[in-house]
Amino acid sequence: FYSQQTAYVWSSVCLGALSMLAKETGVTVLALNLLYDLCRSWHSIKRSIFEAKWNDDSRYFSKRAAALLVSFSILLVVRLALLHGTLPNFSAQDNPAAFHPCFHVRLLTFCYLAALNCWLLLCPAILSHDWQMGSVPLVTSFTDTRNLATCIFFGGCLVLTYKAFTDFEQQRHPPLVLGWMFLVLPFLPASNLFVTVGFVVAERVLYTPSVGWIILVVYGMQVSWTAVPRRKSWITTGVVLLFVLGCFRTVLRNNDWTSRETLIKAGLRSLPYNAKMHYNFANFLKDTSQPNLAVHHYQLALWLWPGYASAHNNLGTLTIDDQAEYHFLAAINAQPGHVNAHYNLGRLYRRTNRTEQCIEMLRRCVSLDPAYAPAFRVLARIATGPATGELLRHVIHLQPRNPDALAEYAYWLYKNGKWLPSLRYYFKAMEIFPSHKPSLIGTLRILRSRGQWSRVHQLIIRWHLMLRAKRGGFIYRGDLYIRAWELQSESRQRTHQHQRNLCISENGCSRPRVASVSVQLEQDSNKSEQLQRAPRCNVRACRQPRKGKTRVTAPTLLVQNFLETL
């Protein structure tokens, strides 16, 4: 990097650009390189300033510095261009201190957060994947005891900064300067000093500062080892103990990340006053069919953060109509642009037969998010006539890979007498999701009405095979019908006997009739060959049905019973 060739400089620039794509703070490595290069070249630069004459070292430094500054500026412009020229917008939930109206509260809290981040590097006892919503209470007064930790932290920073800058001249402690740069410079963008960030504490921004902390700790042990030779055993014991404790803490933290439940519970143990943690745990309980406990944690989240719109919305989905309406309206009042709250309130109004209010809420919903397909689907169910088809076509345009939307539009086409386009949409839905039940039932309904019995038989068998393979070969009730059909294929005589027994004739027949198909389906397949041939019916109308007579065959009844089972 410090040679006459610039290949290493441009390599550093490329790596810094890649790190910026991963995390914005990665671009600070270029500032770190520039500042450390200034430290190493300080004597040459100072000599050039006093002598008013360029030397080789200062000339090479100027080239490296120019390359780093230009690259740093270009990368910042590119990053702002990706944000469309504006800084990200955050809410009070993300960073409560940044939105507090009092300046001294913001200043004291931000200073304490810097000390807290340093403590997490030194002793990561309290870790969490989310530090939003009251995880760190605001420092509202100068008498708060946490200000003592802030003073100790900034006092140490001032001493470290003084030692680092004085070493520019003497160049006796390069590890001290490098560790200080790694510790301070990458953390500055996350310190809320220049721009407001969307988090209170984020462990991900401490990766690069942890390198600086390691350099300082190791360098301090090295200095102590040389300065106090009689205490080498103590230093060795401390290093070993620190290493063991770090490994033990890493194992415990890895166990916290084994599943969603363990991660959320670990966050609740570390930050019991974090409303977001209770909200996430309530979502987990809701997904695992524990509604009562989910309601409790939603209420705790609202107690900790009364204006939590998402908690109001999710709690409304678990309560009865009156309470649900209150929570949906509270979510809309807290966050007027909450799309899901408008949608859920519209569904509640539809369920309670308040159609006009339902349509109004759904229209607000689609005005907030024109691509919100569920709202259009509910509007399609309310609308009548051609408007339903237009809304369903719009839903398919928004979600062309949604089998439910395709099946719903196909059913509307079938009801309006367009069975061929309906069949195409059903097939398209089953191409996306082969075991989609509404599409299969709709296809069977159309094929049955068109007399396509072989295709009906094929689809039923394929659907059952897919479900049985997916669920471990569990025998379904519909498999009885498939087994009966196979028995009829194996024995034509028995098939003919079933058809004759189920023949509905206008004339009387002396043969006994079978009451239902299920009685014959209970017979075992091994006994089918032992059945004796029944006497031939002498009624001519039974053998040759006349025109206009209703004849129901066994396969027809099997398909009807199968569809009723689904």
Image (cartoon, grey):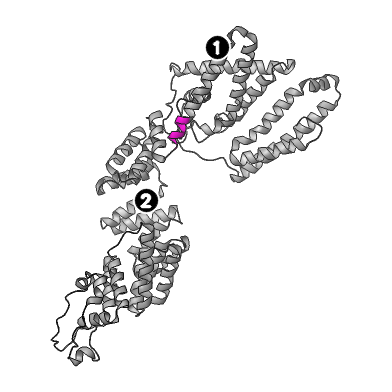
* Secondary structure type for disc 2: helix
Residue lying at 63% horizontally and 23% vertically, measured from the top left: 179
Residue lying at 79% horizontally and 31% vertically, measured from the top left: 3
Q: Residues within 10 Å of mark 2 (few under 14, many from 20)?
A: many
Camera-nearest label, 1 or 2:
1
- Front-lying residue, 342 or 43: 43
Position of 241 relative to 313 (above/below): above
- Front-lying residue, 505 or 447: 505
* Secondary structure type for disc 1: helix
Between marks 1 and 2, how big is the CA–CA gap? 65 Å
Quarter of the figure with residue 302: top left
Determine the residue located farthest toward the top in the rendered image. 230
Contact, mark 1 vs mark 2 (Cβ under 8 Å): no
The image shows residue 143 at horizontal and vertical percentages of 43, 16
Q: Which of disc 2 and disc 1 is earlier in sequence?
A: 1
The numbered disc on residue 234 is: 1
The image shows residue 488 at horizontal and vertical percentages of 29, 77
Magenta residues, as a range? 251-257
Q: Which residue is mark 2?
A: 342
Q: Does the image show residue 380?
A: yes
The image shows residue 212 at horizontal and vertical percentages of 61, 25
**Left or right of residue 550, residue 10 in this image:** right
Quadrant where the image shows the N terminus: top right
Quarter of the figure with residue 34: top right
The image shows residue 426 at horizontal and vertical percentages of 41, 69
- Front-lying residue, 160 or 179: 179
- Kind of residue sitting beneath label 1: Trp
The numbered disc on residue 247 is: none
Q: Main secondary structure of the magenta part?
A: helix
- Kind of residue sitting beneath label 2: His
Position of 228 relative to 301 (above/below): above
